[in-house]
């Protein structure tokens, strides 16, 4: 990696702690990713992106800012990023998947709050995320109570705008959300100084739909037996989709899919066709949260799909591209985003239907339902998920964990036992 220390210093990054962070991440990546056998060649690009996660991409974003672009950071797939790209802005999904700056975060947040929230606060307070530092605006949302309240505190340290997300899907909730989408459009126009015209919005919708199409294509290939790519690699690709340049990323994922299709023709899997197949469902796995996938795939199973926001939930629905007027295009965004089946909604039966459908489509032997500690929406919903899966005769294992490595051995014991039963 080139020497980026001057660039990080200019962003106010705590260089010493940052060096430690990169060392730890490098080692973790080596253990979980580079140790895998039969990885597709197309993963080289993803390895490069990860190795330059705080380098090359940050430089690209700073260069874009120098010529007038604005960068927006988000923490939820509910933010309609098409509006940002339509104003020549750049949207980055910020990392919140590591136990970073925990001590700093716990000075302003309760200890018993979800690790994802603690992580985004910790990254900011410990000055360890160049993305957060360079963002012109952070867009938060009122999805769960923890996040909603945490953004009040976060906004003391970084310019933050919060969207109100509905909790139900009635007519009046659609109206509320439509209103919020229009308000975000105005906010983005104010920050960027660019007018979002129907033409620009239409082309931004196509840009992001293309990325979703490529990820959908990748996911579909994972239905094959033997599966041509590991769950760890597929998760990584989904994680990177949140911050890489969308056009370049889409091209690379499509190239990878070409390679995987050839593997499938040759019946060449990343693991044998006898390997236990699992669906991983539940709370999102933000970068660099690789703990559980690492444990599962070193316990004799392969993850063939993720029912999560860093996976299916983010790519399932497309935005209708046929609209011409601003009203039609905004309505298309509203309809698409209201199809998200986050556990923050009540009722949320469609999520349970989706999980059952995915379990069948991906021919899984069992489901691992994963929840982050203190994530009430997914923890509470796991009861209904488990009941529905049992009714279908699909074995399920419920796991609740955080970002620390302390429970790895315990997780391994439970998962190995589950895999043994499935086998
Ligand atoms: S659309 S899942 S990305 S809110 S912060 S709910 S882990 S307690 S992130 Fe999410 Fe949007 Fe929904 Fe997806 Fe739980 Fe933590 Fe809340 Fe969380």
Image: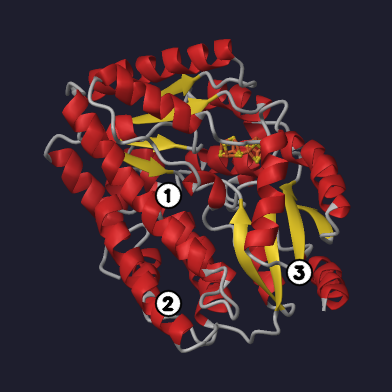
Badge 1 density bin: few <14, some 14–19, many ≥20, Cα 10 Å:
some
Image marks 3 and 2: residues in contact by CB distance under 8 Å: no
- 284 left or right, relative to 41: right
What residue is disc 3 on?
365
In the image, ligand 1 is in what quadrant? Answer: top right
Residue 19 position in % (x across, y down): 44, 62
Residue 60 position in % (x across, y down): 22, 52
- Disc on the earlier residue, 1 or 3: 1
Q: Residue at x 38, y 70 (%)?
A: 257
- Disc on the earlier residue, 3 or 2: 2
- Outermost left residue: 67
Residue 293 position in % (x across, y down): 64, 66
Badge 2 density bin: few <14, some 14–19, many ≥20, Cα 10 Å:
many
Q: Residue at x 42, y 77 (%)?
A: 260
| Quadrant hosting residue 134 | top left
What residue is disc 1 on?
14
| Quadrant hosting residue 415 | bottom right
Mark 1 to mark 3 CA distance (whole Å): 46 Å
At mark 3, the secondary structure is loop
- In the picture, the disc for residue 260 is 2
């Amino acid at each position: 990696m080139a020497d980026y220390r001057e660039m990080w210093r200019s962003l106010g990054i705590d260089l010493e702690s940052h060096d430690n962070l990169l060392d730890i991440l490098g080692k973790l990546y080596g253990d979980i990713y580079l140790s895998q056998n039969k990885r597709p060649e197309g993963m080289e690009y993803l390895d490069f992106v990860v190795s330059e996660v705080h380098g090359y991409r940050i430089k690209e974003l700073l260069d874009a800012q120098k010529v007038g672009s604005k960068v927006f950071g988000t923490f939820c797939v509910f933010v309609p990023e098409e509006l940002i790209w339509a104003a020549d802005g750049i949207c980055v999904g910020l990392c919140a998947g590591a136990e970073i700056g925990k001590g700093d975060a716990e000075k302003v947040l309760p200890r018993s709050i979800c690790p994802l929230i603690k992580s985004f606060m910790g990254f900011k307070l410990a000055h360890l995320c160049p993305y957060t530092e360079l963002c012109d605006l952070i867009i938060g949302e009122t999805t769960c109570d923890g996040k909603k309240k945490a953004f009040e505190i976060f906004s003391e340290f970084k310019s933050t705008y919060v969207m109100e997300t509905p909790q139900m899907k009635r007519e009046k909730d659609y109206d509320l959300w439509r209103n919020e989408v229009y308000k975000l459009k105005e906010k983005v126009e104010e920050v960027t100084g660019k007018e979002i015209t129907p033409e620009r919005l239409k082309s931004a919708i196509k840009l992001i739909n293309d990325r979703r199409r490529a990820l959908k294509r990748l996911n579909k290939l994972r239905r094959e037996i033997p599966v041509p790519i590991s769950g760890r690699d597929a998760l990584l690709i989904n994680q990177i989709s949140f911050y890489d340049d969308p056009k370049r990323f889409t091209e690379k994922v499509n190239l990878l899919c070409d390679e995987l299709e050839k593997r499938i023709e040759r019946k060449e899997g990343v693991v044998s066709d006898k390997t236990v197949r699992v669906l991983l469902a539940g709370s999102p796995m933000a970068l660099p949260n690789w703990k559980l996938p690492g444990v599962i795939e070193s316990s004799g199973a392969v993850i063939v799909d993720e029912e999560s926001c860093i996976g299916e939930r983010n790519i399932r629905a497309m935005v209708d591209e046929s609209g011409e007027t601003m009203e039609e295009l905004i309505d298309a965004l509203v309809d698409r985003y209201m199809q998200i089946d986050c556990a923050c909604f009540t009722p949320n039966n469609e999520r349970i239907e989706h999980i059952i459908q995915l379990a069948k489509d991906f021919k899984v032997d069992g489901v691992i339902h994963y929840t982050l500690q203190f994530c009430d929406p997914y923890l509470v919903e796991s009861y209904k998920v488990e009941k529905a899966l049992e009714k279908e005769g699909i074995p399920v294992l419920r796991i609740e964990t955080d970002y620390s490595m302390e429970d790895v051995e315990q997780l391994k014991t439970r998962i190995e036992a589950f895999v043994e039963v499935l086998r």
